[in-house]
Every structure is written in C-alpha cells, then in structure tokens.
Amino acid sequence: MPVLLASRNTHPKMAFGGRQNSVEAIASYQQALLKHLFEWTQSLNHYMDSRIRMEASILETCLKGLIFWAEETENQPL
C-alpha cells in the first residue's frame, strides 16, 4: 500500500531559506502538499473497493480544485 511521505524540500522552513512565516513559503508548502495528497490518493485506486473508490474520487476532485485555487492565488497580493 502506498505511503504518504513528507519531503523536506516542500517544508516552508526549507523551501524559502528559513523564512518559515513568509506568505510565499506557506503558499508553496500548501501547493506542494495538495499535489502530493492528490498523487497519493490516485495511487490508492487499485487497493480500494468500489464504495471507497467513489469517495476517493470525490476527494481527488476537491484536491484538484484546491490545487487550482492555490496556483491561481499564489502570485496575487493579499
């Protein structure tokens, strides 16, 4: 079964040279985490029965929307 792993490169403290509280670092970390969750959810498909697969599909759709939102709002001023 796939395992969800966090990457040190996507942690806000590592991604922007230690500026953990910067808006850019947090946005970048959120976006990387959402993409990782989406990929992990997709990889689970062949381990699930049809009922769970349907719920995972709903989760995938929500994650796609959040990824889109994160990418669209990343460069906009607060």
Image (cartoon, grey):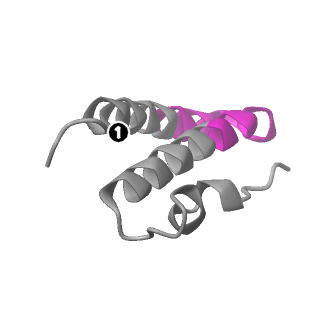
Query: What residue sits 74% from the left and 36% below the top?
Result: 43
Q: Quadrant of residue 66?
A: top left
Query: What residue sits 60% from the left and 63% below the top?
Result: 14
Query: What residue sits 54% from the left and 45% below the top?
Result: 32
Q: Is residue 49 left or right of residue 53?
A: right
Q: Nearer the viewer, residue 21 or 29?
A: 21
In magenta, the rendered stretch is 39-58
Q: Nearer the viewer, residue 12 or 39?
A: 12
Q: In the current view of this chain or complex, which residue is farthest to the front?
A: 17
Q: Is residue 57 magenta?
A: yes
User: Is any atom of residue 6 visible in this view?
Assistant: no
Note whether 37 is above or below 76 in the view shown. below
Give how far across and how far down residue 31 sits, in percent: 46, 44
Note whether 22 is above or below 40 in the view shown. below
Give how far across and how far down residue 74 sits, in percent: 31, 39
- Disc 1 element: helix
Determine which residue is flagged by label 1: 70
Q: Nearer the viewer, residue 56 or 26?
A: 26
Give how far across and how far down residue 24 sits, in percent: 37, 52
User: Is any atom of residue 15 visible in this view?
Assistant: yes
The amino acid at mark 1 is Ala
Q: Is residue 48 magenta?
A: yes
Query: What residue sits 80% from the left and 40% below the top?
Result: 47
Q: Is residue 31 left or right of residue 47?
A: left
Q: In the current view of this chain or complex, which residue is farthest to the right?
A: 1
Give how far across and how far down residue 49 sits, in percent: 71, 38
Q: Quadrant of residue 62?
A: top left
Q: Residues within 10 Å of mark 1 (few under 14, many from 20)?
A: some
**Number of numbered discs on residues:** 1
Q: Nearer the viewer, residue 36 or 41?
A: 36
Q: Quadrant of residue 39?
A: top right
